Image (spheres, rainbow, N blue to C red):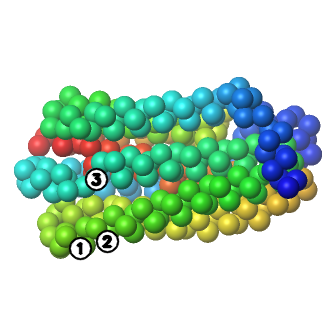
Amino acid sequence: MTSTKDNAACGPQTDRRERSLPAEAGLWLFIFGDLVVFTLLFLVYLAYRTDEPELFASSQQTLSINVGAVNTLVLLCSSLFVVGAVRATRAGNRQLAPCLVLAAMACGFVFVSVKVFEYHDKLETDHTPASNYFYFFYFFMTGLHLVHVVIGLGVLTFLWRLTRRADELTSLGMSSVEGSASFWHLVDLLWIVIFPLLYLVQ
Amino acid sequence: MNRIRILIASRPILALKVPEVLVWIVLVVATAFSWLLGHEAGREVVAIVIMAVAYVKVRLVGLYFMELRGVVGLRRSLDAYILISLVLIIGFYLAA
């Protein structure tokens, strides 16, 4: 285990290899469990799709590929800001790190806004979770992901508070920074698969 | 004002020397590629390529953003997860 002071000395190149992971074991168990649950959900979606391929294809046509792709880019940007925040925290930069976390949070809010607009558009045209199985899975998967985004924004708030003390964090604090960042990357990672599966694969 | 000075002093051009920034560029290009392919919907091979690209992106996020490169156990778990998920998803997709 290394302290932040050591991290600062090593520069931002220091990464997890320098630290053991027991403190984060629970978090990684959660992350992998979450990934497995989503994969099972993807498989159930595909299984239902085999029964009504035409209906799924025609329903899919009503989704905007462009909106989904823009949201993918928004989350990718947020992840890069979080990566930058972790590096700045390791370097003990208490000015830059919180700014980068706020930038990531702004991306998160953009994602939520776009999603709300998308839901509103769907519901206005009478496409509800009860319309057919495609819409049921569309609302269920994206809704479950949206819950992750909202929790993620809470996690980023916690991260923001930590990064404001970037130059005086203990190794446990640094571990919390990395754990929070990993949770946000999970949010990005899930969308990276949900977007092509729901919007692109026909 | 101080914060703005720090941001300017961080010299954006140096960002290209950071591996995560290069990975991010690859992720954006891959997203654009899938986006374009998405308009060619309906062909099985297109769907398989799109899902394969998605899981390559997952691996990049895991290794570089979540920093699993240096943690052997987690890296292997991620690779196993990706391989199993991709095979199952393509299998279920082709079963239609």
* Tags 3 and 2 on a common chain: yes
Residue A32 in the image, given as x and y percentages of width and height: 49, 51
Q: Tag 3: residue type?
A: Ser
**Secondary structure found at label 3:** loop
- Residue A83: which quarter of the image? top right
Residue A39 seen in this snapshot: no
Q: Position of residue A13 (x, y in %)?
A: 78, 33
Pick the residue in front: A31 or A106. A106
In the image, taking residue B1 as reference, residue A195 lies left or right, namely left
Q: Which mark is residue A42?
A: none
Q: What is the chain letter for disc 3?
A: A
Amino acid type, callout 1: Glu
Element type where label 1 sits in the image: helix
Kindly identify which residue carries mark 3: A64
| Quarter containing the C terminus of chain B | top left
Chain identifier of the residue bearing label 1 in the image = A
Residue tagged 1: A124
Inspect the image, locate mark 2, and give the three-letter code of the amino acid beneath it.
His
Q: Quadrant of the N terminus of chain B?
A: bottom right
**Separation (CA) of disc 1 from disc 2:** 6 Å
Return the x and y of residue B45 as percentages of the image width and height: 20, 28
Q: Residues within 10 Å of mark 1 (few under 14, many from 20)?
A: few
Asked whether the residues under marks 1 and 2 belong to the same chain, the reply is yes
The reply to whether the C-beta atoms of the residues labelled 1 and 2 are less than 8 Å apart is yes
Residue nearest the viewer, comparing A180 with A65: A65
Q: Which residue is mark 2?
A: A120
